[in-house]
């Protein structure tokens, strides 16, 4: 039987005033919105597989707060503490997938001792030597700053392209937001649910008012984003957003048809 998962959004940080124009390509909005950083927990209903997709940002330092968007993160947002607050033992986490290595997606995984961490090879290569305009997203190339994912590097399992990790748990290469961006598709009782990082920051990236897709404004190629959307059309029935507070309206996803 195909494995099935139940998904749960966990808030692991918050941008108190994020510009909409940075989420939606060609938006001329001057507004800002409160944008949570969401780590998605996916628990198998039939095995011990417990997956986290992304782990959120670290508490800003004097250095990183100089060039990051204003971020509200405290010690209480650390992924292992958030899991405990939801009644989940961090030791239960079997797998972590980093959709990409931007600073707000991949911190504190060293506090998940039993998890292996699945990351795309292309993304690791780009994260250590990005183009200058992408340096701040990766914390790359700043004095006295070490990207937080490096603290868990000994647990990395490097993958490339699409990978069937376990029944009902598949990684898809979805480049566009970054060169090595990936998504995860989980089988659930309510169809295939895609957790796709910042390809879909806001619900509107996936489903705009006119029904089409909108690339994320932070991207490494709009065409790549559109190709990844087209793939996702075939691979997922439901697509979940990474920084959209409306995702928190439901405590669980994938539980019923
Ligand atoms: Zn990102």
Image (spheres, rainbow, N blue to C red):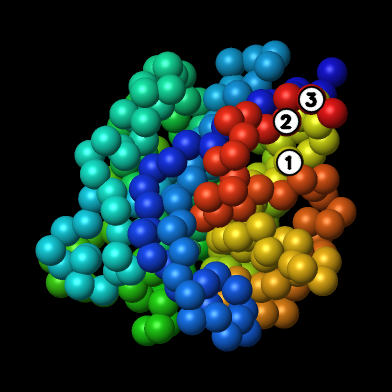
Nearer to the camera, 180 or 159: 180
Q: Residue at x 62, y 84 (%)?
A: 26
Marking on residue 254: 2
Determine contact: label 2, label 3, CB under 8 Å: no
Q: Position of residue 14 (x, y in %)?
A: 38, 52
Marking on residue 256: 3
Determine contact: label 2, label 1, CB under 8 Å: yes
Can residue 190 be seen in this snapshot?
A: yes
Marking on residue 193: 1
Disc nearer the start of the sequence (2/1): 1
- Left/right placement of residue 203 relative to residue 112 reads right
Q: Quadrant of residue 226?
A: bottom right
Label 3 element class:
loop
- Disc 2 from disc 1: Cα separation: 7 Å
Q: Residues within 10 Å of mark 3 (few under 14, many from 20)?
A: few
Residue placed furthest toward the front: 31
Circle count: 3
Label 1 element class:
strand
- Disc 3 from disc 1: Cα separation: 12 Å
Q: Position of residue 185 (x, y in %)?
A: 71, 42
């Amino acid at each position: 039987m195909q494995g099935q998962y139940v998904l749960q959004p966990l808030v692991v940080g918050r941008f108190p005033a994020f510009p909409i124009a940075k989420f939606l390509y060609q938006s001329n909005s001057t507004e800002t919105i409160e944008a949570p950083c969401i780590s998605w927990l996916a628990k198998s209903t039939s095995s011990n597989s417990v997956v986290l997709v992304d782990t959120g940002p670290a508490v800003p330092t004097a250095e990183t707060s100089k060039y990051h968007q204003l971020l509200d993160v405290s010690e209480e947002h650390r992924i292992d503490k958030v899991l405990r607050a939801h009644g989940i033992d961090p030791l239960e986490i079997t797998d972590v997938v980093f959709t990409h290595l931007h600073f707000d997606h991949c911190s504190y995984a060293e506090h998940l001792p039993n998890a292996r961490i699945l990351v795309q090879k292309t993304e690791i290569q780009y994260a250590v030597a990005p183009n200058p305009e992408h340096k701040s997203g990766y914390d790359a190339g700043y004095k006295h700053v070490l990207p937080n994912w490096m603290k868990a590097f000994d647990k990395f399992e490097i993958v490339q392209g699409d990978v069937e990790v376990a029944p009902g748990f598949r990684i898809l290469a979805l480049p566009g937001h970054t060169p090595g961006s990936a998504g995860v598709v989980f089988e659930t009782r309510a169809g295939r649910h895609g957790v796709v990082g910042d390809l879909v920051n806001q619900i509107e990236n996936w489903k705009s008012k006119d029904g089409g897709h909108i690339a994320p404004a932070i991207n490494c190629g709009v065409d790549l984003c559109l190709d990844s959307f087209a793939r996702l059309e075939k691979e997922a029935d439901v697509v979940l957003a990474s920084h959209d507070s409306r995702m928190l309206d439901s405590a669980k996803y994938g539980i019923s048809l």
